[in-house]
Amino acid sequence: IDLSATIGNETFHHPFVNAAGVCDETAPEMQSVLDSAAGGLTTKSATLAPRAGNPKPRYFDTDLGSINSMGLPNQGLAYYLDFIAHTETDKPIDLSVTGTKPADQVAALQQIQASNFTGLCELNLSCPNVVGKPQIGYDLDATRAILDQVCAFYEKPLGVKLPPYFDLQQYDAMAAILNQYPLTYINAINSVGNGLVIDPNTETVVIKPKGGFGGIGGQYIKPVALANVRAFRQRLRPEIKIIGTGGVTTGTDAFELILCGADIVELGTVVMQEGVSAFARITHELETLMQEKGYQTLADFRGHLKTQS
Ligand code: FMN
């Protein structure tokens, strides 16, 4: 069985990568992903300057997933560029980048353009957890404005991480914008923003920032992730690849995302809860399922979701 996939010039020998923000803030964490059965590494979304993030507790596990309001704790863009420059690996490393205002995001991409980095870069337009800052991906004009600015100078392979959308009209409008730019890929979805998890015993929210509101990940969000990948695959130019993220805890979940059109699949909450051993388990589960169904490659079923007539 061949589990490989390509995005831009990068070949992923296995289709599973960590989702940005999970096991990827420090060099030892990133190395542990590269040393696992993961097919590649995504870095924590880097900002120009290091950030401490929001006060703790800022992440909480539940039976069905997680809530977080990390507030972009990261070591700063230079740290991640340096890690990549000094790491020998045949696995693709995707540099996630963001900023708390659009001008900072543009400045970060200017630094990456000027650097020796040649890999995939993922512009995070969807962080729900910076106090007082709405998600760019929910503002069509702001999305167009930043892509206009960035695409005027950025010449390396670029992807965008999107928030979840919930209305078919939103997919139409966002896809129409994205189709106008030379994007290598989109990544759908970031966490479902501003959910609330409550402890009924103490009658209290479980995380401290933003009065308890935070991004939801894990099993809760799989149907939303499937819908976003499917809806964008139906609307985007075929050259724009899709990284499917959200709610994957088993090989079957990953199979479903690929049926919807995902090229590769990212694992977030499941890696928070289980550690990097999740990559080997889920890879094995996908392989077993493909064997049962007689599929040799991911392309044999990618995008082949059936509808009822
Ligand atoms: N997404 C980003 O694009 N950038 C981040 O820095 C980022 N940080 C995250 C930190 C934590 C602790 C978690 C749980 C998620 C974070 N995310 C971030 C969102 C994940 O990359 C992913 O899109 C989301 O959790 C859904 O996947 P899941 O259901 O597998 O958790």
Image (cartoon, rainbow, N blue to C red):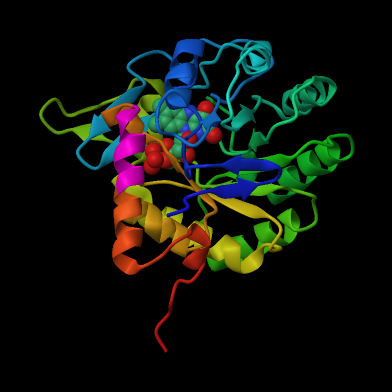
Percent position of residue 260, x then y: 48, 63
Name the residue: 67% across, 62% down. 236
Image vertical order of residue 264 relative to residue 91, above or below: below
User: From the viewer's perspective, is 105 left or right of 11?
Assistant: right
Say which quadrant the N terminus sits in. Answer: bottom left
Whereabouts is ligand 1, in terms of quadrant? top left
Give, as a single range, the part of the protein colored magenta. Answer: 276-284
Q: Is residue 223 above or below residue 44?
A: below
Q: Is residue 257 visible?
A: yes
Q: Residue at x 61, y 42 (%)?
A: 11
Q: Position of residue 7 (x, y in %)?
A: 64, 46
In percent of the image, x 36 and y 36: which residue is there? 279
Residue toward you, 244 or 174: 244
Q: Say left or right for 77 vs 231.
A: right
Q: Is residue 11 left or right of residue 142?
A: left
In the displayed structure, 53 sits above or below 222; it is above
Evaluate whether residue 194 shows in this view: no
Closest to the observer, 160 or 115: 115
The picture quadrant where one finds residue 195 is top left
Q: Position of residue 179 (x, y in %)?
A: 75, 58
Q: Residue furthest left?
A: 201
Whether 279 is among the magenta residues is yes
Looking at the figure, which quarter contains the C terminus?
bottom left
